Amino acid sequence: MTTVVSPMRAARNPYSPRILGWSSAAACLLAMEVVIRIGWISQFIVPPPSEIAASFGRLILEEHIIRRFFYTVGECLAAGAMITVCGVGVGVLLCRFGLFRKAYETWVAALASAPFVLAYPLFMVIFGRNAWAIIVMGFVSGLPPVILKTIEGISGTRRVLVNVGRSFNLSGSQQVWKILFPAALPTIFVGVRLGLIFALINIVGTEFLINFGGLGQLITDLAERYDLAGTYAAICFVILVSILFFMVLEKVERWLRPVD
Amino acid sequence: MTRIHRPAPVLNPVMLLRVALVLALLTVWEVLSRSGWLYRDVVPSLFKVAAAVYALLSTKDYYFNLGVTSAEIGAALLIGGLSGIAVGLLLGANRFLAKAYEPFLYYLGPTPKIIFFPVMIMWFGVGPESKVALGTLSCFFPVALNVAAGMRQIDKVLIRVGRSFRATGAEMVFKIYLPAMRHPIVNGVRLGFGFALIGTLLAETKLSNKGIGFLIIQAYSTFDMPRMYAMLIVLFVLAFGANAAIGRLGGLENIKRT
């Protein structure tokens, strides 16, 4: 005797939406494979997914994608360190001097939406076609969210904590490092996460545009050689890297978030 | 007793600080340009940049290229925005579909879209179509995610009112969901505009023979730095202006928030 699962019960199963999502993605890949193999879509425009998957080995062995991955990650970490130090520093200063905050906070917010990446030729002129131009590009684009979130975090510190610090006669810097900074850390990390995401996007984008560096350059190289399967595989690899990066940052953010 | 509201003085300390920062930056710039510490013309004199802005805005060629880029961004915003709104409405209205497909959008959203440009060239050629396609792809994700999130925040009472009047699906969309979601939609379109602009212009700098991106990279190739600075300045001003105009047209400041 077979048991019939009612649609209501299926909808309540927490895994069924995920199953639908992943099976749809698998069905799309399968459909693409079939459509390309029978010639409805030219293999010279879109290679079959199986060919793309097979070219990953070649990317690892011949194109040194892992080394390029670490190169890009290194650039991101360098930009991330600069973003964190400068962003938190500027944010703390703006909080400490209220007049500066009133004057410049809206400007920083406007800069957060500025299309900095379009100025990449300018960075190439100033720094040359090298890793520094790419790192500074990432730094400039990732800085505003860290400043804004630092301001938000510090100004949102509970009054009672600040008063506890005062009752212990803490100095200005002790107040910042022992009260304000730890209390604002979860919010600051939201800014660092956003900054790092912006930095990664801009770093890979700039590598691609100036044909220099790690993963972005690999895509340009492969596309110029008309290595279709390799180009698609490298793009998939960059997508996987950014998803992984995003997920790791989300996990750290959740870990830092205080439990209510 | 009535209280008299006096307007804040124009030269208040905040304004003075702002003016001071601008003046300091301009002075540092001019000193750098005259110091000879950097290669010649890497930081051109402000007067040269101002002259280049004037020269740029007085050439017909610039307006032709601005027209090309604007048309590409407009097309990208139209296609990406409309498809983003449609997908956002679908995912926002159906929790099951949202759980199934929204994680894909959520995680694909922050990937660098410019890396898809070689694929767009293969699919759509080297003309404006590939730039529009990249702009569309860049614009789609923020609009879809914003609309889906906005739809879930609609007051449930409004939805129940619509249902109690036995509104059809289309009536629910046009009479309940869309009016209630003006704010997230306008915000999504604003974000989408920014991404479409960046996507389109970056694609133009990589491979094109017309458009503002092409002009910027041409100025870089010929090391015409004052012209390049002039184009970037005008571009940033236009981008900020267009962003503010979308917000104003969408009536963001008139929306009452509870």
Image (cartoon, rainbow, N blue to C red):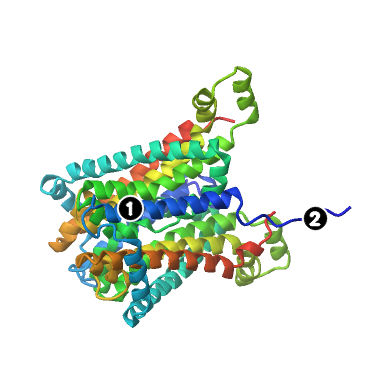
Three-letter amino acid code of the residue under disc 1: Val
Q: Is residue A15 above or below residue B250?
A: above
Please give the chain letter of the residue carrying mark 1.
B
Give the x, y percent position of residue B94: 55, 57
Q: Which residue is the extreme one toward the bottom?
A: B60
Please give the chain letter of the residue carrying mark 2.
B
Give the x, y percent position of residue B91: 51, 58
Q: Which residue is mark 1?
A: B31
Give the x, y percent position of residue A158: 62, 31
Name the residue located 65 percent from the left edge and 55 percent from the top edge: B9
Q: Which residue is mark 2?
A: B4
- For the residue carrying disc 1, how many other residues have a C-alpha within 10 Å: few (<14), some (14-19), or many (20+)? some
Q: Is residue A118 left or right of residue A9?
A: left
Along the line of sight, which residue is nearer the eye, A188 or A14? A188
Please identify the quadrant where the C terminus of chain A is shown. top right
Asked if residue A11 can be seen in this view, the reply is no
Name the residue located 27 percent from the left edge and 66 percent from the top edge: B205
Name the residue located 38 percent from the left edge and 62 percent from the top edge: B138
Asked if residue A247 can be seen in this view, the reply is yes
Q: Is residue B158 left or right of residue B193?
A: right
Secondary structure category for the residue under label 1: helix
Q: Which residue is the extreme one toward the right?
A: B1
Name the residue located 55 percent from the left edge and 58 percent from the top edge: B92
Give the x, y percent position of residue A1: 47, 46
- For the residue carrying disc 2, how many other residues have a C-alpha within 10 Å: few (<14), some (14-19), or many (20+)? few
Along the line of sight, which residue is nearer the eye, B159 or B82? B82
Q: Quadrant of residue A227?
A: bottom left
Three-letter amino acid code of the residue under disc 2: Ile
Nearer-N-terminus badge (2/1)? 2
Q: Quadrant of residue A120?
A: bottom left
